[in-house]
Structure formats: structure tokens, C-alpha cells
Amino acid sequence: MSQNTPNSRPPCPDAANSVTCEGCVEFLLDYVDGVLPEAERFKFESHIAFCKDCEVYLDNYKKAAAAAASAGKQDRSRAAAEVPEALIQAILRTRKHSH
């Protein structure tokens, strides 16, 4: 991710204590999940504050994750609605007899 794009922000004034764009990608999942240790989270957020490209990448990642989660919920709901009632009852009867 380039720091020299027309829309980029000035370089991070504390770049020595920040992470690179590549480092942001490595921290992304833990950051979004809220499990990134405080020191790394600070470095990640410092970089995001000064790198427009990484800020956009993070935003797109969050949107994609939300869309995937939403699609998964819809698929589960649809699958549950497609199970025939007779099959559900047969499974329940079998469970009662096996206990």
C-alpha cells in the first residue's frame, strides 16, 4: 500500500513505533476480533490514522466480514425452513426411543 498516493495522509510522525502496511495485514484479523494485544493495537491504530490505503482496506475487510456473516445466517435460516416436518418428527421419535 503506497504512502505516495494523492489521497494519502502525511507519513506517521512516529513511524519507528508504527507498523508497515504489510504488518497491518498481519494484525487485521486479531484487531477486528478484538484480541490484538494493547501494544500492537496501538501500533496498528497509529498506522491506520496516517495511512488512507490501510484505512480503506480495514473498512472493506469489515464490510466483507459482515456480508459473509449475514449470508451465513440467511443460509442457515433457509436450510432450517426447508427441513420437512415429518423428518423432524421422525428424528425426535428416534431420539426418545434411544434414551
Image (cartoon, rainbow, N blue to C red):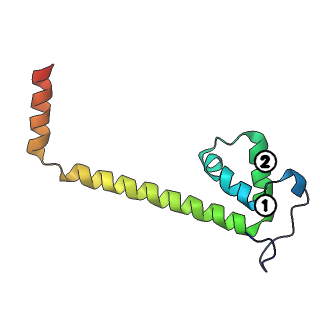
Residue appearing at x 67%, y 52% in the figure:
26
Residue 1 in percent (x, y) is at 72, 69
**Residue sitting at the far right:** 13
N-terminal of the pair, mark 2 or mark 1, is 2
From the viewer's perspective, is 75 left or right of 15? left
Give the residue number, with chain letter if any, for mark 2.
Answer: 42
56 lies above or below 93 = below
Residue 98 in percent (x, y) is at 13, 22
Give the residue number, with chain letter if any, for mark 1.
Answer: 49
The kind of residue on which mark 2 rests is Phe
From the viewer's perspective, is 87 left or right of 60? left
**Residue sitting at the far front:** 22
Rate crowding at label 2 as few (under 14), some (14 to 19) or many (20 or more) other CA atoms within 10 Å: some
From the viewer's perspective, is 27 left or right of 82? right
Of residues 40 and 92, the one nearer the viewer is 40
Residue 99 in percent (x, y) is at 15, 19
Residue appearing at x 81%, y 76% in the figure:
4
Q: CA distance from mark 2 to mark 1?
A: 10 Å
